[in-house]
Image: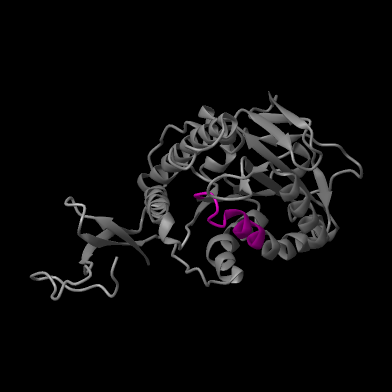
Amino acid sequence: RVVAHACLMKPDLVRMYLRHTAMSPSGGALGEGAAGEEVYRLAAHPLVEHALSGGQATLLTYGQTGSGKTYTIEQVFSLASPLLAARARHGARGSAAPLRVSAVEVLGRRCVDLLSGSPCQPLAAAEGGIELKGATLRQVWSGAQLEELLAAASAARATQATGANATSSRSHMVLSIDVPPHQGPPPPPGATEAVRFGGGGRPPAAGPAAGRLTLVDCAGSEWAADSAAHCRERQREGAEINTSLHALKNCVRAFAERARSGRAARMPFRDALLTRLLADSFGDSCQLAVLGCVSPASAATEHSLSTLRTVMELAGGGEEAQSWTSHVRRVGEARPPPGGAWFGCSC
């Protein structure tokens, strides 16, 4: 359960009150003191197991800029690396088979390979979906190599100083890990493969039993007030970020509605490049988790409430939000209002 406290002004612009909002997400909630192991166990471990069993699994981090999304995804990746590396060592029929890793960033309608720094050109693949021309697909054999790739990708990601964060990510990072199957021949040594998303997503050499784990570190959502003092370039980036996040929310909402009702739902993944790359993540057999990151700072209360409402709406299944208010005592005020109660502070 998460409870957010917002200090608000009454219409007379003199008295203040506290509005408390409690939410209980279906997947659970963790406090600011939670260790990375707790976050991994709650949100990521089931997805890793699903990918290791040959399924498609995707984890999205969502929230305002500066709320800890990149730090969280790095912690999850660090804890998942040993399990994934173990599959590389004991992959196809007991023989070694590498993981295949790609890392790209999406900046509006543009895409850049984070492992080589070269721009990627999205092209329609013959099997359906998108083939990223110019993207790098690395073969990885150990957990240490996996973490080195993530560190290199994070360092190459586009960041800029904003009013909310000195190193705000200005792009969405999509990290894709193709997991070798339990059975089937390993890929030929030195074989070159294209990076493909959607339309089956996985390279043909991986075989039908190969799994895929996709980690998406979304850029932070921004309100108009956050970017009012930004230059035109930062404002354009903010608009592109919000547009792609809106398309992503629509896709996740349709995915959750289909899971709840069992009825087919239109999946608007063509509305943005980010959702086109993640088209496979909204398939019937995919497992999808949204990890909402919020800031405990009082200045970020409205942002945090917006993130919580969005995650509750997308995930569904949790209890409805409950809200109540507390009177805030003014300096010199001697007694509580009729039927009310004091809150232990003054504003």
Give the left or right position of residue 29, taking residue 145 as reference: left
Quarter in which the N terminus is drawn? bottom left
Give the left or right position of residue 226, taking residue 153 as reference: left
Give the left or right position of residue 36, taking residue 191 as reference: left
Magenta region includes residue 74: yes
Q: Residue lying farthest left?
A: 338
Magenta region includes residue 145: no
Front one among 129 and 36: 36
Q: How many marks?
A: 0
The structure residue drawn at horizontal position 68% and vertical position 65%, both measured from the top left corner, is 79
What span is in magenta? 63-76
Residue 135: image location, x then y, percent: 77, 35
The structure residue drawn at horizontal position 70% and vertical position 44%, both measured from the top left corner, is 157
Front one among 339 and 37: 339
Quarter in which the C terminus is drawn? bottom left
Residue 100: image location, x then y, percent: 77, 47
Residue 260: image location, x then y, percent: 37, 48
The structure residue drawn at horizontal position 53% and vertical position 28%, both measured from the top left corner, is 270
* Location of residue 35 by image quarter: bottom right
* Location of residue 338 by image quarter: bottom left
The structure residue drawn at horizontal position 23% and vertical position 60%, both measured from the top left corner, is 16
Q: Residue lying farthest front?
A: 332
Residue 151: image location, x then y, percent: 76, 54
Colour scheme in the image? one colour
- Is residue 200 at least partly visible in the picture? no
- Is residue 120 at least partly visible in the picture? yes
Front one among 52 and 183: 52
Give the left or right position of residue 263, taking residue 168 as reference: left
